Image (cartoon, helix red, strand yellow):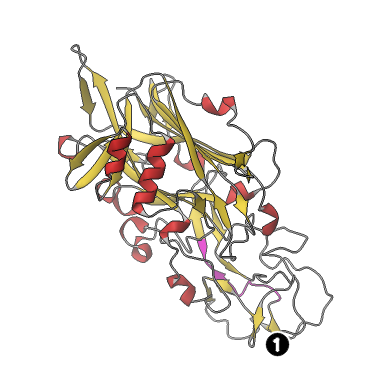
Amino acid sequence: MRTCVTLLVQIRRLKKGKYMGKASPKNLILGLLGLCTVVSIGGAVSSSLAWYAYAARANLMYSGTSVFDNGQLQIGLKSSAAISDLVDAGLSEELINGSYYYFAPAGEGLTSDFMNIYLNARGYASNELTPVTSGEFNRSDASTYGVGGAVELKKAPTSEVHAPDFQHNAAPHSSYSQMTFAFRTFRTDANGDIQYVSGQKVWLTYAQTRASDNSSGNVSKAMRMFVNRTASVYGNNNGFIFNPSSKNAGYTKVAGLLSLDFDNYYDSNDNGEIVYGEYEILDGVDSGIINSHYSGPDEIHDINGSGATTADTFTAKHDPNAPAYYENLNKLDIKKANYEGLDTIKPYKDGNGVLSDVDSNNPTSVCITGGESVGYIGEFDATIYLEGWDFSVIDEEKAHQFDFQLRFETNRV
């Protein structure tokens, strides 16, 4: 038997301060086995969503938690500093090895109040997200990204800060959400006392992003979650980017031409068109990268390969007044942010419903509960953000609503 935690994130449009809709009942039945925690986030996009606009935001509001049944999974939050308001709100505080853990009672979940208190106390976004980027990321390249391959989110590039200085343009904590989830599995003995169990894996087994309430739009495809697992347990490759809208592994290109001033032309300066983001010139290429003034038809060019046929952030015209232009970008090494899809991280389930890693040498669980010395806790950092280089982050998406759902499961003990 399995125990599951369901994390439902819903971003919804606000109108005159009131919600436009409610969570669909079918979203609340994802996990009737064991402990099921549903966290709803509602909000709106105000102004432009184009990620280069500093005023562009997806507004969030944590709006509730539902719990079904009793289970064998206890959920909590970790903090490096005490957050007394969480205790006042009803969570229990435990100080373990210098860190503070705030747990809901066994078999119960986290309320929206808990999440808002926690995120606000730690300086992370609790009511709005601003599109950012991970920049180049490859979880297997520990020599480049260090132990764990920890991602460092960056703000949007500008005409003054593009490449290579863009790599140091760190995004503030207030532009994304980061939480450390803590899990404990337990059994109840003959006397009714709880006994925590070590060595139990927790997996991410379900994810969905979609337009909500029959809304159109594709902005949900830009949602990403960086999963940062314990390096001492998982080794150098403990961190990975998860794209909940993709079943398979893939990548996002993190450089290209952009149109940032709404004039339908790719941006340029005194040297010609600007390549924003992270890239290198391929070895052996010393000429023909950029051509002299554009003199062709005044038409849209899909230089970045977005597939769009009308002008937007990523798709525009060549400005004939620019001193030089790029006919294509194939002579540049455009860097990529590699991500995992659900089918590449979810566990194998046998005929009895028992979960296990598909590849024991490359485990994909998000955490493993520890022993007595660490309070029998398994934990991981979850960083939720909008990837600005995703082609869906364009101005036309600014009023679209979407749902973001996650489910975590563990084997019953």
Q: Is residue 342 magenta?
A: no
Q: Where residue 310 sits in the image (x, y, percent)? A: 77, 61
Is 49 placed left or right of 206 in the picture? right
Look at the image and tell me whether residue 283 can be seen.
Answer: yes
Is 196 placed left or right of 10 in the picture? left
Q: Where residue 346 sits in the image (x, y, percent)? A: 45, 37
Q: Can you say whether 304 is above or below 373 in the image? A: below
Q: Which residue is mark 1?
A: 323
Q: Could you say whether the residue bearing mark 1 is in a helix, strand or loop?
A: loop
Q: How many marks?
A: 1
Magenta-tinted stretch: 327-336
Seen from the viewer's position, the closer of residues 28 and 292 is 28
Seen from the viewer's position, the closer of residues 258 and 201 is 258
Identified at 70% across, 36% down, the residue is 214
Q: Where residue 353 sits in the image (x, y, percent)? A: 42, 22
The quadrant in which the N terminus is found is top left
Q: Is residue 333 magenta?
A: yes
Seen from the viewer's position, the closer of residues 334 and 361 is 334
The quadrant in which the C terminus is found is top left
What is the chief secondary structure element of the magenta stretch?
loop
Mark 1: few, some, or many residues within 10 Å (few <14, many ≥20)? Answer: some
Identified at 47% across, 33% down, the residue is 64
Q: Amino acid at mark 1?
A: Pro
Is 310 placed left or right of 6 in the picture? right
Please, which residue is most extreme toward the top here? Answer: 190
Q: Can you say whether 226 is above or below 115 in the image? A: below
Identified at 48% across, 64% down, the residue is 135
Q: Where residue 126 sits in the image (x, y, percent)? A: 45, 48
Q: Quadrant of residue 202?
A: top left
